[in-house]
Amino acid sequence: MKVIAVDTAIVFEPMLSIQQQIRNRPPTGWEPVFFDTAAGLLGELKKLTLTPGEIFRQIEIVSEASPVHIDHVAVPFDGPADPADLSPAEFGAALTRLPGISRAKTVVYLSGCNTGLADWDMKIDECTAQVLANAAGIGVRGAAGFIEGLHATNNETVSEFGDNGEQYQHSRNAKRGKCWNQFTPH
């Protein structure tokens, strides 16, 4: 099963357009879920009906993000602002307890800006994507720049620079599969 999980707690563009797009016309072959907290996302994934032996092949999480957080899913290490949010390590550990998560076959796509990059004062092993991969024991893909579009619709692009000229180390301009940095558990 492929799941596209969309954050509904973000109420400004472009997230509002993405929410509407997924509600009105989910990508073919993808099951849509909507969440506003990490606990809500885990609950929505639990509700999905998997046939015997079926696994989550891909889970795309669409939210505002940076190298160190995913809004309403995995927040910085200095502690969650909302008790329903989790650190990347806590979210990864909770994800592994879901039925249908396969350490060998499940891949999570973090569709938020710069989720596959390191901030200037951190190592790549500290970025959200790597911490999540380590904690969940699964493959994770993080965006290699400021992202537009969705993996589920195969129209994603990343840009090296944000609207305000902001840039993270090792960001790039790319399209589709080249938008993602891959992280494996270690």
Image: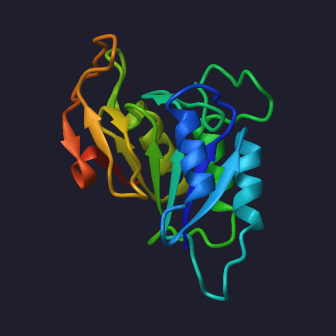
Q: Which residue shows up at 62% across the image and 59% down it?
A: 32
Q: Is residue 63 visible?
A: no
State whether residue 80 is above or below residue 186: above
Horizontal side of residue 114 vs 40, given as left or right: left
Residue situated in front as seen by the camera: 110 or 127: 110
Residue 39 image point, x, y percent = 76, 45
Q: Quadrant of residue 50?
A: bottom right
Residue visible at 71% across and 69% down? 48
Q: Nearer the viewer, residue 185 or 13?
A: 13
Farthest residue, direction top = 164
Quadrant of the snapshot with the N terminus: bottom right
**Which of the pair 22/134 is nearer the observer?**
22
Judged from this view, the residue extending furthest toward the right is 83
Query: For the point 34% across and 27% down, which residue is it?
Result: 118
- Residue 105 pos. (x, y %): 45, 72
> Quarter-wise, where is residue 160 in the image?
top left
Q: How is the image coloured?
A: rainbow
Tell me: 39 left or right of 170.
Answer: right
Q: Position of residue 82 (x, y in %)?
A: 77, 26
Identify the residue at the far front of this view: 24
Q: What number of labels is visible?
A: 0
**Residue 56 visible from this viewpoint:** yes
Q: Compared with residue 163, is residue 140 higher up or lower down, i.e. above or below? A: below
Instruction: Tell me where residue 151 appears, x and y as whole percent.
Output: 39, 54
At 49% across and 31% down in the image, what residue appears?
Answer: 14
Whether 96 is drawn above or below 65: the answer is below
